Image (spheres, grey):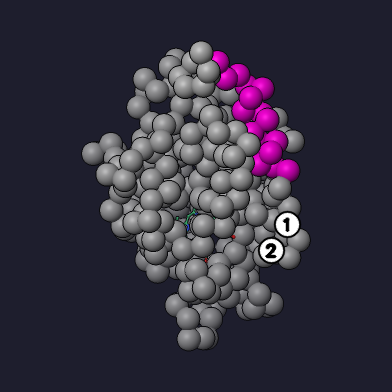
Amino acid sequence: QEGGAAATAEKTKEDYQKVYNAIAAGLEKEGYDDGSLAPVILRLAWHASGTYDKETKTGGSNYATMRFPSEAGHGANAGLHVARDYMENIKKQFPWISYGDLWTLGGVAAIQETGGPTIPWRPGRIDGVEVNQTPDGRLPDASQGSKHLRDIFYRMGFNDREIVALAGAHALGRCHVDRSGYDGPWTFSPVTFSNQFYDLLLNEPWQWKKWKGPAQYEDKKTRSLMMLPTDMALATDPKFKPVVQEYAKDEETFFKDFAKAFATLLELGVPEEQWKGKQPMTIDTA
Ligand code: DDH
């Protein structure tokens, strides 16, 4: 017997480590943004998972529905073809892995390979069909404030502390005018995972950027960094702010909380029986 269920049932940690290593091997890319594909690959994992709605149990990472034109075309997903195209090459080398497992494993690689915490991860997602796509509007809108953040993240099942922890991913990457309309990186080292986002958010003086683009903040001193209105909401909301202060001071606690919340995010929408009793595993850095 070749291929099919029999072949996928036998996969071990070593098989997933090989996929991870292949993803990790190509992350560095001279000439692209800040020299790494890790941020955009992380964003793919997040947008594939963050569509989850706990009431209807729809959306999430299970079906990898961003493969289909409708969901790929949602405004929030602009630019993520860069990450999906990269993953397509990995899929050719490991055709047995589901897209949901592949994309979420990419998120794990993006965090771990840029110096972030170890993210517990397990395989079990299956490829869905077009009717599994979620409607537009499930991912956060950067122009809004605290209420919107809570509406969006409570819908996924997260609490206030987890909202703040997950937002620390903006230590990585940047905004692109031709994707979201916003412009610039959040931190001075956008290819290193750290707690710098919180420190800058609290301790830099910020001002509204004067430009024709959407309302965003820039740092007064260098005018090279940015914050979205939703990022700034974390520093002003009375419940979010103490957590921002805690993470700005204590990177270890941030790493611990981020790893837990991000691992949960990556599993949203996957029915329990699909894990087949398997516990999350640890994949080593490449
Ligand atoms: Fe984000 N994010 N994000 N984000 N995000 C953007 C880029 C990146 C929001 C809006 C934007 C999370 C939360 C939020 C990453 C990871 C995560 C951009 C710019 C916008 C806009 C896109 C572009 O122009 O290319 C908003 C709003 C929220 C929120 O309200 C909470 C979370 C939870 C994560 C995560 O990974 C856990 C990453 C990485 C990027 C950088 C992408 C890149 O190409 O670089």
Residue 151 appears in view: no
Kind of residue sitting beneath label 2: Tyr
> How crowded is the residue under tag 2: few (<14 C-alpha within 10 Å), some, or many (20+)?
few
* Frontmost residue, 3 versus 162: 3
Q: Is residue 192 above or below residue 118?
A: below
Q: Is residue 271 above or below residue 80?
A: above
Q: In percent of the image, x 55 and y 70: which residue is there?
A: 176
The residues bearing labels 1 and 2 have C-alpha atoms spaced at a distance of 6 Å
Furthest-front residue in this view: 1
Query: What secondary structure is marked by label 1?
Result: loop
Query: What secondary structure is marked by label 2?
Result: loop
The residue beneath circle 2 is 32
* Position of the C terminus by quadrant: top right
Q: Are marks 1 and 2 in contact (CB under 8 Å)?
A: yes
Q: Is residue 60 above or below residue 42?
A: above
Q: Is residue 278 above or below residue 156?
A: above
Majority secondary structure in the magenta region:
helix
Residue 234 percent location from the top left of the image? 47, 58
- On the rendered structure, is 128 left or right of 24? left
Q: Is mark 1 within 8 Å of ligand 1?
A: no
Q: Which residue range is magenta in the image?
A: 10-25
Kind of residue sitting beneath label 1: Lys
- On the rendered structure, is 270 left or right of 30? left
Examine the image and state in which quarter residue 11 appears.
top right
Q: In percent of the image, x 69 and y 49: which residue is there?
A: 27
The residue beneath circle 1 is 29
Residue 8 percent location from the top left of the image? 51, 21
* Frontmost residue, 168 versus 212: 212
Residue 147 percent location from the top left of the image? 32, 58
Q: In percent of the image, x 31 and y 45: which residue is there?
A: 130
Q: In percent of the image, x 69 and y 77: which residue is there?
A: 222
Residue 225 percent location from the top left of the image? 63, 71
